[in-house]
Amino acid sequence: MLSKTTPASYGVPAVIQKYALPLAVAVLVIFHAVGFWGLVFSGNPVYFQQLTPMNLLLTNGLLFAFHRRWNQPFILFAAVVFLAGFLAEAVGVHTGLLFGNYRYGSALGTKVWEVPLLIGLNWLLLVYVTGHLSNFARLPWVAKALLGALLMVLLDFFMEPVAMQYDFWSWHHGHVPFSNYAGWFVLAFLLQLYFQKAAIFKANRLAPYVFLVQLLFFISLYMML
């Protein structure tokens, strides 16, 4: 027999669901706004550089809290994208192939093979959110993959000068080569093709906001250089 309190127990998830998205967006905006202020206006940008890993982990935590159906295809997708991004960066750092001659600074935390572990997570985040955005377009799946890759390159265009300024990574002679954007595009396109064909849940409500907040964050920092 159902108790009289049963309706109330069903109401709690409904309330959480109603306010979860605006709260998550508010947290994203606040943390990125604080990061922007700290890097540009605080007078102690090094301290805020050191908080970058926490910000990235928070963003991923919020994003994937909105993911549904943590099934085997999704776990495989996440592992493949993480490893592909990380290993591509490892090859790039040690050989200069794929992207060009660059090295990582200390701002992104613990490194393996001279590449921060968080870089693999960042590749996963970017492929995931841009894949969601491209799905809003009424295009064939290959064209959606192309759009997703272009969105990733767009973000990287604003990210590169900011990264050099704040010790995320640095380029040989301080110049971002065209090979970086070409390499980013090729790898991003391959991973976007995988996203489009993978049997995973592709209706994460927070994904578009994550991309927008990050894009505005890096554009704002880019304009302050």
Image (spheres, rainbow, N blue to C red):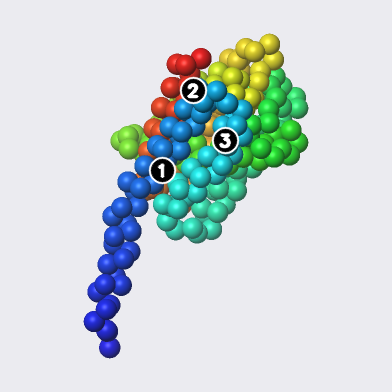
Name the residue type under label 2. Answer: Phe
Where does label 3 land, which residue? Answer: 52
Residue 153 position, x and y percent, is 49, 25
Secondary structure beneath dot 2 equals loop
Secondary structure beneath dot 3 equals helix
97 left or right of 70 in image: right
Q: Badge 1: few (under 14), some or many (20 or more) residues near its Cα, within 10 Å?
A: some
Residues under labels 2 and 3: Cα distance? 16 Å
Q: Nearer the viewer, residue 125 or 199?
A: 125
Q: Badge 3: few (under 14), some or many (20 or more) residues near its Cα, within 10 Å?
A: some
55 left or right of 2 in image: right
Q: Nearer the viewer, residue 213 or 225?
A: 225
Mark 3 or mark 1, which is nearer the start of the sequence? Answer: 1
Where does label 1 land, which residue? Answer: 27
**Residue 162 placement: quadrant:** top right
Mark 3 or mark 2, which is nearer the start of the sequence? Answer: 2
Where does label 2 land, which residue? Answer: 41
Which quadrant is home to the N terminus?
Answer: bottom left
What's the residue at 68%, 27% (across, down)?
Answer: 105
Q: Note whether residue 193 is visible.
A: no
**Callout 2 touching callout 3 (CB < 8 Å):** no
What's the residue at 59%, 24% (across, down)?
Answer: 166
Vertical arrangement, residue 112 with respect to residue 101, above or below: below
Mark 2 or mark 1, which is nearer the start of the sequence? Answer: 1
Name the residue type under label 3. Answer: Thr
